Image (cartoon, rainbow, N blue to C red):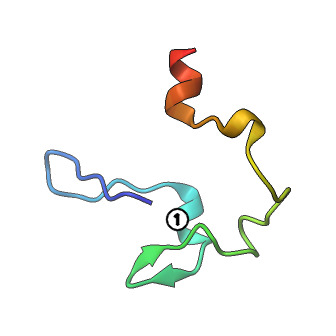
Amino acid sequence: WREHRFPSGKIAGHGNDTMARKIDGNPDYSDPIVCPTLWRGRIAENRTMESAASA
């Protein structure tokens, strides 16, 4: 989660933010109830989103 503010100063939100538990007032997307782990292990070829986008 990364805070984003509109020019008005209001914090942008997503519907899932309201379902996830909060840590220090911010949504915790490691919450296993809302975002369960679907697989464990290495990401294929250890690629990140940035390297995948540039491929």
Rendered location of residue 4, percent (x, y) = 29, 52
Q: Residue furthest right?
A: 39
Position of residue 7 measured from the top left corner of the image (x, y, whole percent): 14, 45
Q: Residue at x 53, y 27 (%)?
A: 51
Q: Looking at the image, is 24 positioned above or below residue 26?
A: below
Sort mark 1 into few (<14), some (14-19) or many (20+) by Cα contacts within 10 Å: some
- Residue at the spot x=56%, y=57% of the render? 15
Picture layout, residue 55 above or below residue 38: above
Q: Which residue matches tag 1?
A: 17
Give the side of residue 3 with respect to residue 39, left or right.
Answer: left
Residue 16, image x, y percentages: 59, 60
In the image, farthest residue toward the left: 8
Quadrant for residue 25, please give it. bottom left
Q: Is 53 positioned to the left or the right of 47 in the image?
A: left
Indicate the quadrant containing the N terminus: top left, top right, bottom left or bottom right.
bottom left
| Side (left or right) of 35 relative to 30 | right
Tell which of 11 and 53 is nearer to you: 53
Percent position (x, y) of residue 10? 23, 58
Q: Quadrant of the C terminus?
A: top right
Q: Callout 1, which amino acid?
A: Asp
Image: 35 above or below 6: below
